[in-house]
Each structure stands twice: as structure tokens, then as C-alpha cells.
Image (cartoon, coloured by chain):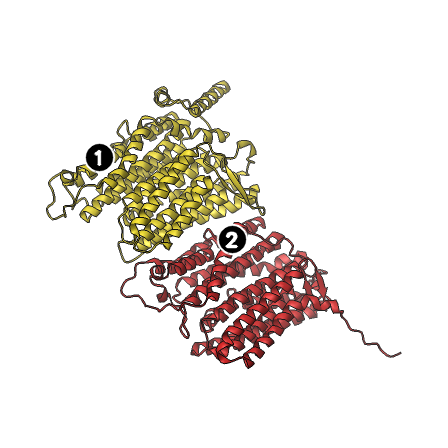
Amino acid sequence: MTPQLVIPYTSADWTPLAPAFVVGAGALVVLLADLILPRNVRRASAISLGTLVLVVAGIVAAREWGHPYAAFAGAFVNGGFAIVFEEIVVLGAIFSLLMAYALGRDDQVGGAIALMLWSATGAMLMAGASNLLMIFLGLELLSLALYCLCGLGPRGSARESALKYLVLSSTATGFLLYGMALLFGATGSVSLAALAGPVWSVPLFDLGCGMFLIGLCFKLSLVPFHVWTPDVYEGAPLPVTAFMSVVTKAGTLAVVARFAYAALPAPAAHQILVPLWIVAALSMIVGNVAALAQTDLKRLLAYSGIAQLGYIVAALAGTTTFGLRYAIFYLGAYTFMNLGAFGVIALLSRDRDEGSHLRSYAGLAYRQPVLAWMMTFFLLALAGLPPTAGFVGKILILASTVDAGFVWLGVLLIVGTAISAYAYLKIVRTMFARTTGAPIQRPFKPASALPWFGVAFCAIATFVLGLYPIAPSDVLPLVK
Amino acid sequence: MIAALVIVPIVAGLLLYALPRSAEAAAKWAGVVISFAAFLAALASYGAPDESVRWLQRPFTASFHVGLGLGPSYWLVLLLTLSTGCALMVTRLPRARDFVAQMLLLLGAMTGVFVARDLLLFALFWDLMLIPVFLVLVAWSPTKTSGTAWKYLIYNLCGGLALLLSTAAYGVVQGTTDVIGASPASLANISPVWSLWIFAGFAFAFLIKTPVWPLHTWMPDTYADLPAPMAAVVSAVQSKAGLYGFIVIGAPLFYASMRSVAPLMIALGLIGLLYGAFAALVQDDMKRVVAYSSLSHLGLIVLGIFSFNPVALGGAVVYIIAHGLFSVGLFLAIGEVETREDTRLLSRLGGLGARNPRLAGGLTIVALAALGLPGLCGFAGEILILTGVYAAGYVWQTIVALVPIVLAAAYMLRLFQGAMQGPEVADLPQREDLSPVAMAALVPLAAAIVLLGVNPGPVAASSARVVAKAPHWIACPAVGGVRAYVQGTSASSDLNAVDALACREATAAGGAK
């Protein structure tokens, strides 16, 4: 009897991966179009094709809602959780793409957007990954594209940024991979679902978890694994920075949440995860303190991102169901307010001159009142002040920490917020203060409607999410 | 309708930016019209039903719940809209369009604080009302640095965030934050440990906002650096948000904790009362005189609230409104002096009264109200508070509290004499007396000062619903003469409710003996 070839999956297994495939294949279309279209329409075609691809992927993902399915023997679990993260990745990628309208060289835009799409594909794979190999696959796809993206742009700092990101991120990946190997050694399986089974009292398991989480904390840029973030953010082109600040975080956060909630055996989880909450607390304080002294908005938003991710991870403390929902809500709110702030910077930028220095904002309220008010609104949201989604998100996280018995995290969150208010409102102060001496007269480039649309959409979403804080109720199942 | 009182000024404030920058007069009069329209709308909303839309389902229920029915809310909203309208009428600032927009944003946010019936909504507006003041301090600061703005913001934001944490904790413990003005029966008791910590967060925010010594150091700088119209509104109304919080949130929800800290609060109130009065005596800047006098007057109100006596509480509410009325008047008059003479230092000013009889007359009325002349609003509040505090058994505290009332006469007369009387100072510019518009702004304030002075009954009685909602409020029988004073001028049934409650509890206490 001849051995029969058994295909270990059915055609239905491909459906959950469809959104990621759409984005990955769409990147090829963008590249092809860049090749054959005349030079003067390349930028417009790349941006519109990229946006179109992402919108389609978003719709395809949304249609999967309510059909949980574990594809490829549980390597990719589709369900509410994965779809919410996929949608956040799609939104983050769309608003980052729109910023490319005003920045970068014409002949680079097509390639950059294709790379961004591939990176987003990686993040979308991470959103549903529930086995260690899938996680690694997604993470590498995400990171490899970003190494190239960081190096785009004519400045020396771009090359510094790319190299720094490559070296440090590879180190982190090393940690992650080593942790995975140890976990496999301890449990004999690469599936997250298998980890959750018996209580693993082997030291190998604890060590594996630790190294795995260290690798992820690097990607989330939580303190003390955050040192690369400001330099990389500052050197990378603005759309790439915006992309990294949301899409990378969303993908990695999906893995962290799935690991914390579903992969750890319940009694052990509380002890194993304590360092993670401490890391979150450190991020809230250190990120905000470091943001105080920044005069470059990209650096400031880098430190702010460190603190914001600290808030989100703090919401997971105690691994309560509500905590997960509020973490997802805050991540969504953060997507809009952060990309809105980056969008305003993009609108103030000219080619080769990103409007990210604090000086560019002096007296903005008297030159561009609408932009100044939008920026104020996004900064208030990041600071957690009303009337924004940031305010409601912070209340929800506070409630979740108090509810889970982590009152100290709630108190530190308040302390961090108080510190951050100065960092954010410093920019507001610069925009509204009477200008002393001659302000930098930056000829305002009336960008096309698209980036404006992005910023306006972010502002409306930030406001409306504050009024109707919809936290997805159906984010399970995570692994099975 | 009540929600419109909040939303319309905020939307209008933002829409003002659509006007061309040069349309200063149009912006100013648009602001005046909106403020007085809000005043009339609020006046007509007496007894209007609450409006509520669900906001959060989990982790605790919260609503966009607004209402004017609860005690001092109605009067505070009237005070707020009236003072904003009057302040906008006399606004003469560079970049007036932007300034009016900020005033309207402030109006909407502060109305929100006073009509919110949900703790989370209250916290939202509490933080929101910082922003316009911060932006005005930054953009219209007389100095190049923004030190005052940061001082104001950091102090008040720390309070606001403590309030936020307490709100979240209250919501998690109780399952809902929709509790301001709820009936006592629907309020579950919190365990004493939680209650004290949660109350501490609220109290911290309220003490900073009021401000109460020793958390007051942001106040004199802020009042001195704010343009007069906004200083008037902030001093008259925003500083009352803390006291309002003690009355409608502290007393009904955290009764036991409030009582347990009462000795401390009374001590802080007394210190503020004395310190503010003495500091006001020696200030050279007219705005700082008024700022420190505010510290003193607000200390008296703290005394009235924490003596847990219905009469003192009624007096506290009357004095909250009264202080609002005369401090708007004082700041607007000082603003007029400043635009006229380019200085507000008492050592530089003098003899203005001879050429500016209308300004001198206006300042006289508000200064007399501030120093507690019987028949004007200041007296009505003071006498009720002092009687109530005495009746609550705080004898020597009442005697100490009398000292600053004498001092008030000294510093208010010093303010008036320093600016208006004496020989004219030759090197000051001589400008026209108050314009008819400025007179028109002072008239409603003066009318309200007199009206509240002779008929404090309805305002005092508005505390009755709060007392009725504090289930264990320990009442002491009101002293006869004061009751006659209040009752003789008011036929309000609410007041009889206070009285009935006082009598009932007194009887119960007597019966227990």
C-alpha cells in the first residue's frame, strides 16, 4: 500500500487568511502599477491603490465577524479578537499611507507603500497567530519591511534609524526565538493552546515565558526595553513613524494579550505576568517623564507612545475579560488620536522638511487656527483630558485596574497622566502663546484633500468614541 | 433644553473662529447675546425635568445626565450666565474674537459642571473647564513666560486627576456613577475604608479648586494675570465648583467621611479666613486684594458647609452666590480702572473718583457688598453662616470668624480710598468715565446684589433638597431671629422643609435624651 499524501488542511482554512492575502497581493499590484504608469501619476496611484487594497481587506475581515475558525490546525485562529486587531492594523495603515502624500520622493513612494503593505500583512498574521511559528512568521514579515522603510529618506539620521532598528530589533527577535525554543522544549508543542494545559512547573517554562515576553516588550517599546524608540522614530520618514507607532504595536499587543489570556495556565499566570505589570508601570512613568524635555514632536510622540502602551498593558493587569476589552478600546482610541497628531505634523510638512520641531508651532493658532485646534484636540486626547476618547479610555482602564485589585497601577497611571499633561500642553502653549520675535514663517502647503480627510476623520473618531465608547464584546475565542 | 445650555455655548465658541479676525465687535456682541440668552433660558428652566442618555454600560453605568433641579445648581448657572454676559460687555482686549470664543467655551464647560448629575460627567466638565483658562493665561499673559498658566494648570489638573481616580473607584465599588442628586434610598452604603479614600480624592480636587489654604498659591497669580473679564468669571463661579462639590457630592454620598474630617476642614477654613484677610490688607495690586479677600470669604463658606447645620448651609449657598456677584463687580471695576489708568497698583492710583463718578459709584456698591453691609448680599450670607456655625456648637470658631469681617471693612475701604479718593495723581492719563455699555453691565449686577441682600430666602432654601438627601444630617434648631429674618422675606415652601427637618431632628434628639 503506497503512502497516501494527506494534505493537513482544507480549502476552508484559507478563508481566515484572506484579509492578509489581499494586503500582501495588493502590494504586488502597487509595485506593478508603479512600474508601468507614467512618473507624474505614480504617487497618486500608489496611495490610492494602497488605500483601496486596505479598504478591501478591511471589508473582507469584517465579513468574517461571527465566524470563529481555527485554521491550519490552530495556527491561525479567526474570531472577534483577530478581526478587531486586523481592523486596527488596516486603519493605522490607511492613515499612515495618506501622510505619504506630502512627503518623500516621487520615485520612492510606490516601493515604500508596497513595503508598508507587506509590513501590515505581517501585523495581520500576528493578530490571529496562535502558534509560536505563526507568531514568528508575522513578526519577521512586519520587521523586515520596516528595516527598509526606516532607511528611506535623504537624511543621515534615516540610516542611523534603520541600522539601530535592525540591530536592536534583531536582538529582541533573538530573545523571542530563544524563548520559543525553551517553551517548545518544556511543553513539546508550538501551539499556544497546548501551553495552557497542565501546570508547567519546570524552570524551563518560566524562563521561556520570560524571554518570550522580553522579546515582545522590545517590540512594544516598554521600559526598560524602549531605548531604541526615540532615535528610530526621529530618523524614519514621518509616514513610517506613524505606521510603526500604531501597526507594530497593534500586532505585538495581539500576541501579548493572547499569550497572557489564553496560553498561560491559570494559576501560574498571575505570578509569571507580574513583571509585565511592573514593566507597564515603569513605562507610564518613565515615558512621560522623558517626554517632558523633548523639543521634537516625533521624539515626543515616541516617548508618549511608550507611556500609552504602558496604559494599555496596565489594562490587561489581572487578565480580566473587561480589561482586555478596555485595552482594545484604548488601542483603537490611541490609533485615532496618535495618527491624528502625526497627520497634523504631515500637513505642516514640506518635502524634505518635516514640521516636527516645536519651533514650527509657534503662534500656529493665529496662522492656522483649524490645524492648531485639531492638534490641541489630539494632544488633549493623548493627555487623557475631555472631551475625547482618551478621557473615557483612561476611565475604563482605571476602572479595570481598580476592579482587578491593582489599585497601585491605577494610582501610577494617574501620576503618569499628570506628568504627561505638561509634555503635551507644552505644545499647546507654543501654539497659542503670543509669539515673541519673528516666528518661523513656514509657507503652508495646501495639501490635497486626502491628508485633510485623514486628520478630520481621526478627530471625529476621537470625539465620537468618547461619546459612544464601544468596546467589542465578542473578542473571544482567543486560541480555540 | 438643559443640555443646550452646555452645548450651544461650546459650539458657538468654536464657530466664532469662522468669523474674520477683524470682526471683533461682532464676536463680542454675539458672545453677549449668547450669554444672556443662556441666562434667560436657565431662568425659564426652573423645575425643568432632568435629561439623561446612557453613556457607559460597563464597568459601571454612567449617563449624560443633566438637570437644574438640585439645590444650588439653578442659582449657580444663573450667576454664571449673568456674570459671563456682563463680563463680555466690557471686554476690550486685543484679539477679541479669540477671547470671546474662549469665554464661551468656559461658559459651556462650567455650566456642564453645575448641571451634571453623573459623577463621570462631572469629572469630564471639571477637567474641561481648565482648558480655556489655560489657553487665555497663555495667550493674554502680561508677561512673556507662562509660569502662571502652568501653576494654574498643574495644581488644578492634579486635583482633577485625583477626582477622576475617585470617580472610577466609586463606579467600580457602587456599580454606577449616576448618583448626584439621587434619592437617599437608592444610595448603597460604601464600606468606611473605601469611602474615606474615595472621598479623599474628591476632597483634594475641591480643596484645590476652591482654593482652601494651604492649596491656594495658584490663585492670586492666576487672578492677577487673567484679563479682567475672565478673572471675574473664574473668581466668581469657577472657584465655587469646589464648594458646590462639597455640598452636592460630599455631603450626600460621603456623609460619614465628611463629618470625620470636619474639624480639620473647619481649621483650614479658619486659617484661610484669617490669612486671606490679613494678606488682603497689604497688597498693592488691586486684583490681588480681591484675590486674597476671596480666599478669606471662601474660608467662611467652608466653615459654613462643614458645621453641618442647615442654617449655615443655607448661608453658605447664599454666600456662594453673593460672593460671585460682588467679585464679578469688583474685577470688572478693577478692569475698568486698569484700562483707564494703565495700572492697578494702589500706590500709583488715587483721586479717580472726582472725574469718574460713575466708576466710583459702581465700585462703592460692590465694595460695600463685599464688606458685608446689611441690606446687601454679603451680609445675608455672613449672618446666616455665623449663626449656623454658632448654633452648631462652634463658639470660639465663630468669634474668631468675626475678626476677618472687621478686616474686610478695612481692606475694602483701603481699596476704594486708594483708587478713588485723595488727590488726583497728575501723571496718570485722564480718560472718560464709564461708557453707557459698561454702566449697563454693572446695573444687573448691582440689582442682583440688592435683591439677594433683601431676599436671600429662595437661594438659602435651595440647600433644603441637599439636606433632605443627606440621610443622617444632624440639624440644630435655627436661632429664632435668623429664622425670622429668612422667613420674613420668603414664602418659600422649600425653606419650611429645612425648618421642618430641623425641628423634627431636634425633637428626635430631645426624645432620645
- Per the image, label 2 sits on a secondary structure element best described as helix
Depth order, front residue of B235/B252: B235
In screen coordinates, is A88 left or right of B68? right
According to the image, label 1 marks what residue?
Answer: B364
For label 1, the crowd category at 10 Å Cα-Cα, with few meaning under 14, some 14 to 19 and many 20 or more, is some
According to the image, label 2 marks what residue?
Answer: A464
Q: Is residue B139 above or below residue B83?
A: below
Q: Which three-letter amino acid code belongs to the residue tagged 2?
A: Val
For label 2, the crowd category at 10 Å Cα-Cα, with few meaning under 14, some 14 to 19 and many 20 or more, is some
Q: Nearer the viewer, mark 1 or mark 2?
A: 2
Q: Which chain is red?
A: A
Q: Residue furthest right?
A: A1
On the question of residue A390 being in view, the answer is yes
Chain B colour in the picture: yellow
Q: Is residue B244 above or below residue A380?
A: above
On the question of residue A170 being in view, the answer is no
Alpha carbon separation for disc pair 1 and 2: 50 Å
Q: Chain of mark 2?
A: A
Q: Residue at x 60, y 52 (%)?
A: A322
Depth order, front residue of B257/B63: B63
